[in-house]
Amino acid sequence: FLFVACIFNAVNALSITTFNILAAVHRSVPTTGEAARESERRDLWLPRAEALAQFVAEELSFSDVVLLQEWWFGQEFQQVFDHYTSGIFDRIAEQRPGPVPGTLREDGMAVLVKKKGKLKLLDSAKVQTGPQRIAQVVRCQERSDSKRPVVLGNTHLSFPGGPDPVVMARRQAYEAHILARTLSKTGRQLAGAEGGHLQILAGDFNSNSCGLASAALESTRHYNFINCMSAHAEQNLNSIGGSVGVGVTHRTHRGEEVSVDQIFARLMNEDGSVSKTSLRRLGGPAGTHVVDCCKRPMQIEGEGILSDHMPVTATLYWPTTISREKQNSSSTGDICHPLESPWNT
């Protein structure tokens, strides 16, 4: 039974990956003069772009959705990336606003949705979370007959580079709050969707699972998101509860090794309200639960890196709700009631 359940989960589960790909406009490169960016050296950024695109196409093609941070809007970069990935994924991107109203930065965020995956891409919206900072809200829909909505929130919270860590933590929490509030509003707009819908909020938090931003999202009073890694650990009895990370996922420009790439999820009711049932307490093959949450180990230090972040993937089993009438109509006398002894004669 356990073996069959594992296969069932693998076949029906939804895979979500988050990956900060280190935009060439942000990567410093060695130079004899003034500090330069990789984007100014085609001989440096082009080989990395090609290797990065190949990595996504080959190593992340199992994922139904890939949320990318630090997406570079350079025309040639996008052409290179699409050359390797456009046959596998649909892509939709949002660009960051610039310092002057009406201008745009060179980078932003992008979401890839697998063409032959479980979801169909519908649309995307930009959410401004601070000066020159955005989040991305992407609406998808199941390709199966149920056609349940899935709403994705792609985020990149502020880097804690200020002198006051408390102020920086509060800034990150507020940015996460703006995105979560937008997802809640989107959920209300989807009221009436049969079986409710699933919401994912993921990205580069620039803080770990114990940070203020994570705590705000996990507040049962407000948003009731669950950290997928913490939920997976609890469901598999690897944890007694509390926040759990996947280990180091990023090496900062200051040489710090941190765990900042996170995936959160929550269920929404048919009326568009937030479900008060946590995913981590719906374990077992019959209920929605986190099948797995892990990072893809890769080199994040040195000149030959693809990125200074590792991809993190959460796999969620989200079964379709079957009405009692349908269950009764499809039942047979050979199937026992779950509380009936199979040895009764």
Image (spheres, rainbow, N blue to C red):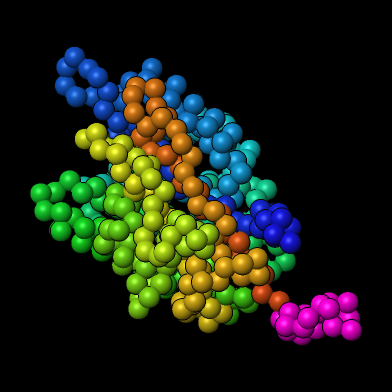
Q: Is residue 180 left or right of residue 320?
A: left
Task: Identify the residue shown where x is 11% and y is 53%.
Answer: 164
Give the quadrant of the C terminus.
bottom right
Q: Position of residue 86 (x, y in %)?
A: 59, 38
In the image, residue 42 lies in the stretch drawn in magenta: no
Q: Which quarter of the picture shows residue 201? A: bottom left
* Picture residue at 63% right of the left edge, 77% below the top: 194
**Which residue is at the front of the view, 322 or 211?**
211
The extreme left residue here reads 163
Q: What residue is rendered at 25% in x and 51% in y?
A: 158
130 sits left or right of 120 in the view: left
The answer to whether residue 110 is seen in the rendering is no
The image quadrant where one finds the N terminus is bottom right
324 or 198, which is in the foreground? Answer: 324
Q: Is residue 343 magenta?
A: yes
Q: Is residue 294 visible?
A: yes
In this orientation, which residue lies closer to the viewer: 292 or 190?
292
Q: Main secondary structure of the magenta part?
A: loop
Residue 231 point in image, percent of width and height: 47, 62
Q: Residue at image x 38%, y 72%?
A: 223
**Residue closest to the eye, 297 or 55:** 297
Q: Which stretch did the figure color magenta?
A: 323-345
Q: As displayed, is residue 345 above or below residue 236?
A: below
Number of numbered tags placed on the structure image: 0
